Image (tube, rainbow, N blue to C red):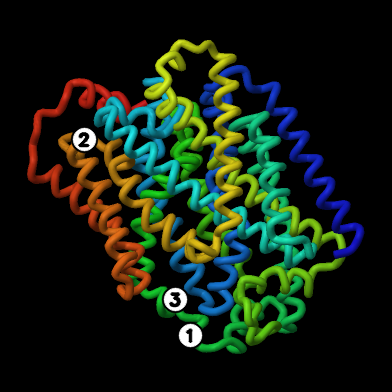
Amino acid sequence: MQPIDYVVIVVFFVLLIGIGIYSYFKVDSSADFFTAGGKLPWWLSGISHHVSGYSGAVFVAYASIAYTHGFTMYVWWALTIAIAMIGTIFFIAPRWARLRSKTGIQSPTEYLATRYNLPTQQLMAWCGVLVKLFDVGAKWAAVGILLNAFMGIPVVTGIILSGVVTMFYVTLGGLWADVLNDFMSFIIQVASGLVMFVFVLIRLGDGPAGVATMWDRLPAENSQWFHSPYTVWFAIAFLVINFFSYSGGTWNLATRFISSSSGKEAKKAAVLSAILYLIWPLILFYPMFAAPIFFPDLKNPETSYSLMAMEFLPPGLLGLLVASLFSTTLSMTSSDANTISSVITRDILPVFVKKVKTFDKKKMLLIARLTTFSFILLTIIIAFNAKTFGGVIGLIISWFAALLGPISIPMILGLLPQFRHSGSTAALLSIIGGLTTFIVLKLIGGFGLAIEIAGPLVMSLLLYIGYSLTVKNKVPEQVDNLLNAINED
């Protein structure tokens, strides 16, 4: 990197600090800190929902898969998200916004105490917090690898630097700081991604036709939609996982809908995010697909994207790309930190410290900031030990994806009136059955990636839906009232 690249990165950090300070003055209460007071514009919510699905892990773990397996990376990741979002648009996103406007929730798990009961809510809240510790830890590890590749700084130093910057601005500004950083991330990512796309096309020498002819220079299987172990069954598993994840089972994504002013606005935000997932990754991933042409036989494919960037981008633009990688990772991790903080502050702490319920808005805001800070600190510690859990890919695919289903299924299906008979027993069976399946598959091993990922989710889904179909308990009045209230604006 050249001096101009470092100048660009410094300017980026200054902008982040400015966003944190600006957002600080927009936050007067925990409602502002966690849900932007329900005033998030649909276009900002949609962009934030989209960008929150990216992190440095995309440019490390997913870039590695794009290098070794090709187009299937887009198919099982971005395309399945876009398809899964169809269900989110019509059935789930509007209900999240209505929950906030009609019940005053500030966290995604807050409604579960009414929908099921307090013990079920607490189990789901604790499990979700633990899963997110691993997920965010993987993202810090990924950005540390990227900074090591671009700037030569030790991975540990990169993790600490990223974590400290995020601690600063999200602890100050909460959700407003998070979504404004998302918007800035999106602008930077589009600018650097388009430049990278054009430079790779120019180097290939076939003009616009290089988009198609590039595949002739790669192994034949790299252009296939499915490439083992990323089979059609793996893609189907991820389609189901992505429905539950992007509709709000990944809590920070639920927050984007919760913070919308109405169900109609939340639906528009979901449409925008789905369209972006369908189109933008095709451009963004193009250099990753082309990497084997320029860097054959890489020993560590996780460095493929950073090597491509250093090869093709001139001074200044390389700094812009590094800033975009920083920005996407920091926006995703800060988003997670903000949402987990809402769960701890609103749903977990009041159970153990009763007087929290009597705190005024200033004390609640202070607790919100303290829990945000503490969560980020714990994820940084996990990032230092990423190799223990199977590296970045292992953490993201094997741990997070496999554990997501058991937690998200009762949360998402619990919003739908069709499952009103699935009460706390169904939710507990679903969670415990899914987690037990995950443990058994991990201990025995040898089942293949698709089964390892899908097994816990399928078990949870069967238990939850099966209970609803076979057991017709009387639906409590408060559950009926809740489901009816969120059925329309």
Q: What residue is pinned by disc 2?
A: 424
Q: Is residue 13 visible?
A: yes
* Residue kind at label 1, given as amino acid type: Glu
Q: Nearer the viewer, residue 318 or 424?
A: 424
Residue drawn 79% across and 65% down? 152
Q: What residue is pinned by disc 1?
A: 221
Tell me the element at label 2: helix
Q: CA distance from mark 1 to mark 2?
A: 47 Å
Q: Nearer the observer, disc 1 or disc 2?
A: 2
Q: Is residue 89 visible?
A: no
* Residue kind at label 2, given as amino acid type: Ser
First of labels 1, 2 by sequence position? 1
Question: What number of labels is visible?
Answer: 3
The location of residue 227, given as percent across then percent down, is 43, 79
How many residues crowd around disc 1 within 10 Å: few (fewer than 14), some, or many (20 or more)? some
Q: Which mark is residue 225?
A: 3
- Residue 95: image quadrant is top left
Whether label 3 touches label 1, CB < 8 Å = no
* Residue kind at label 3, given as amino acid type: Trp
